[in-house]
Amino acid sequence: MQGITRRQATTLLAGPLLLAAFHSVTVQAQTPITENDFNIDLYTGPILGGGRAMGMGGAYTAIAEGLDGAPWNPAAYGSRTLWQLKWFEWEITGSLMFPGGFASNDFYNSGTTEGFAVDRFLFVTLGARLQFGDVGVGFLPQWRTFTLDDGTGSPVDVTFNQGHAGFAYQLHNGQIVIGGGWRFAKVSLRDANNLELVSTSGNSAELGVLVRYEDQPWRLGVATKTPVATDADNVSGLMVQDGVSSAGGLVLPRRAYMPWELQVGFAYQFGDRPLNQRWVDPQNRNKSLRQSQTIQWLSREHQQWMREQSAAESPLGSAKALDDPRSDLRSDPRGNPQTDQVQHRLPSDPYAWSEARPQSPSFWKEEKRRREEELKHIDEQYERDAQQRREEMESIPRFYVLLSTEILLTGKSSNAIDPEAFLLQRHRRSGTRNSFAYRFGAETEPLAHRLKIRAGTYLEPARIEGATSRGHFTAGTDLRLFTWDVFGLFQKFDIRVSGLLDAAPRYFNWGVSVGVWH
């Protein structure tokens, strides 16, 4: 017999192994569930979130702007945009999407014809974010409801409430942002008779960092999410027989599991419009003006006090007062106080620095008038500075082309099946290994101050055994409609309407939202 090559030997050995593996998967997929010793994998493959992030294929970890970026990177809670110039800023966001608008959708990417059709899918988000100087906080709940129907007249209503809450802090004038928070999830399944089949909830930590150096056309973002492992709560129709818990004829799981995630993203922007800009705290400018003004007040007080001492012909008293260490005021050769010493000793009460104060009523009357005028001038200067910053921001060129990409690594779910397999009561494994995905997106503004368009693509990994990964195409647009002055009570806002879509084999998602144009 002739010898065989290494390649032929490998083929002969691998063939039976592959057949055995296929047979094992097939048999396992047909095995009914008879024990509670299994978990549910709550991994979600299709991207659900804000319109801009979804339109760019979910490649948003390195952009992380606005509250919609929080599910991707908690640093978004404190990442200021180009137009957020004030010390205090606020944001409200919301969106409405209709994933699974067609009954043929395979939401869990099982890749089989056996299963449940996804119908009446509704995804709603509504949240708020507050920015206080370098600190930002936010809260973004998300509601997901849909119906799974196997065609037998026994549909199951699924409610999956997920949310994010956290805070972030800016370093180096906003060039580096670090954030942390929590993600929480609650899942409930009810049958056609409103009998609760599964109810579970839990939370875990999130961490993120965003690098956005001034005048650089790139950004780098990294975020991680720890797993959520929750025990199944008691349900209304719970039954225990021979040590097996069930409800509505379904054998219940031990727990539900959201795996850990690690995301690394990079973004680059072409064009004249800057991607990053150093944030200048307007209160620092105001504080500097007021400190300089306080020094002038103390200087006038000191000079008046010197005149009063000279007029009273009290040189010893004058010298004693000037030598008082509590005042820490020493006169230079011109008789003016050394302002550098004053700056280091300024208390909250500018009059508490010394007991040697002028006594002339006429001086204090005039001084009060002068200080009121000087404070008014400082306020006017502050407003002029704010207006100048707004004008500079509005004069920034509009054209740009933003490219963003990221990779996503998701952990495995131990001894788990997908939610659809649970309803089928079949051991169809899900999340048996770590999964990898990539995302890419692009955005531009072809019509200045009027229209933005974006497109993207992402890979949805196969979590279910026997299924294959599938690619998605996404697109979105923002259209500025009109300016609204909120009945003249607040500042004016440019209102925009947004649309998005996400298409893949056996899946289609579309949505609309209304918000503020920037």
Image (cartoon, rainbow, N blue to C red):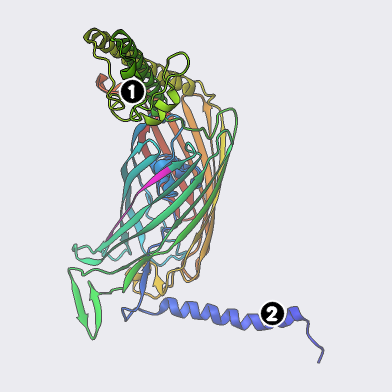
In the displayed structure image, the side of residue 39 where residue 503 appears, left or right: right
**Quadrant occupied by the N terminus:** bottom right
Pointer 2 residue: 11
**Could you tell me the amino acid type at mark 2?**
Thr
Pointer 1 residue: 320
Q: Residue at point 24% right, 76% down?
A: 246
Q: Residue at point 32% right, 58% down?
A: 185
Other-residue count near label 2 (Cα within 10 Å), few / some / many at <14 / 14–19 / ≥20: few
Residue 84, compared with residue 321, is above or below; it is: below
Farthest residue in the bottom direction?
1
Farthest residue in the front direction?
316
**Disc 1 to disc 2, C-alpha distance:** 102 Å
In the displayed structure image, the side of residue 224 where residue 127 appears, left or right: left
Q: Is residue 164 magenta?
A: yes
* Viewer-nearest residue: 219 or 466: 219
Magenta segment range? 157-169
**Could you tell me the amino acid type at mark 1?**
Lys
* Viewer-nearest residue: 226 or 282: 282
Name which quarter of the figure residue 494 lies in: top left
Residue 397 in percent (x, y) is at 54, 24
Q: Residue at point 37% right, 66% down?
A: 257
In the displayed structure image, the side of residue 383 where residue 367 appears, left or right: left
Instruction: Name the front one of labels 1 and 2.
Output: 1
Residue 403 in percent (x, y) is at 57, 40
Please indicate, yes or no, whether residue 124 appears anywhere in the rendered image. Answer: no
